Image (cartoon, rainbow, N blue to C red):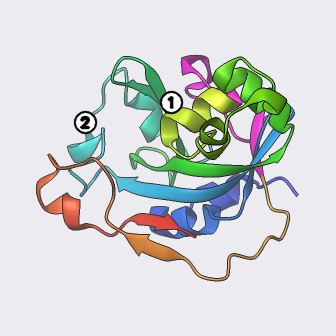
Amino acid sequence: MKLDKSFYTRDTLEVAQDLLGKVLVCNDIKVRIREVEAYIGAIDKAAHCYGQRRTKRTEVMFYEGGHVYVYMIYGMYYCMNIVTGNADEGSGVLLRGVEPVGNIDAMFVNRYGISREIASKYQIKNLCNGPGKLTKALNITKKDNGRSLLGERLYLEDDHFVVKQIQKGKRINIDYAEEAVDFEWRYYY
């Protein structure tokens, strides 16, 4: 069942935890969400829109929940966030790790340019276990920035998978964020 807008327009920390186990569909590729990080611009110095900072880059973060915020890091990797909450809040959830569910062959072509049959153990293990890796495997790019998750190219499904125990911890690579480095807004299973 495709998730509707009401799923995304809730509290960011609740949405982040509820995303675990959901299936992200991108064209004909399906992956299960295993790891996420929440960002709340009003109070979070790690958020791109901290202090309600609106720029051309961050404007999508202020859309109503249910849109995709895609940005580039290190000049080479795209990262994908799911915008949450109401319009003008500036919050979202970064997808950090997923596991393949459907059309895995296409993921290997997107990520490595090879078929799954000739992939090394290292390539198999690292197919989509990081934010830049998963967007490459799903072929998510800047052209998806601002896209609605209620459309046909990119959306989330609930297949009633049950996450038995959610783990939480500090977010990764945000050493610059002062007190926000201690927020335990990373969720995974």
Q: What stretch is highlighted in magenta?
A: 138-156
Circle 1 packing at 10 Å, graded few (<14), some (14-19), many (20+), is many
Nearer to us in this view, 76 or 49: 76
Q: Name the residue under label 1.
A: 70
- Kind of residue at disc 2: Arg
Screen quadrant of the C terminus: bottom right
Nearer to us: label 1 or label 2: 1
The local secondary structure at tag 2 comes to loop
Q: Where is residue 33 in the image (x, y as percent from the top left)?
A: 65, 55
Along the line of sight, the residue nearer the viewer: 15 or 133: 133
Q: What residue type is labelled 1?
A: Val
**Can residue 27 be spotted in the picture?**
no
Answer yes or no: is residue 95 visible.
yes
Magenta highlight on residue 154: yes
Question: Residue placed at 30% from the left, 31% from the top?
Answer: 54
**Total residue callouts:** 2
Horizontally, is 31 left or right of 83 in the view? right
Residue 71 screen position, x and y as percent = 44, 27
| Quadrant location of the N terminus in the rendered image | bottom right
Judged left or right of residue 104, residue 148 is left
Q: Which of marks 1 and 2 is nearer the N terminus?
A: 2
> Measuring 75% from the left and 76% from the top, which residue is drawn there?
162
Residue shown at 41%/44% (left/top)? 88
Q: Mark 2 points at which residue?
A: 53
Q: How far apart are marks 1 and 2 (CA)?
A: 17 Å
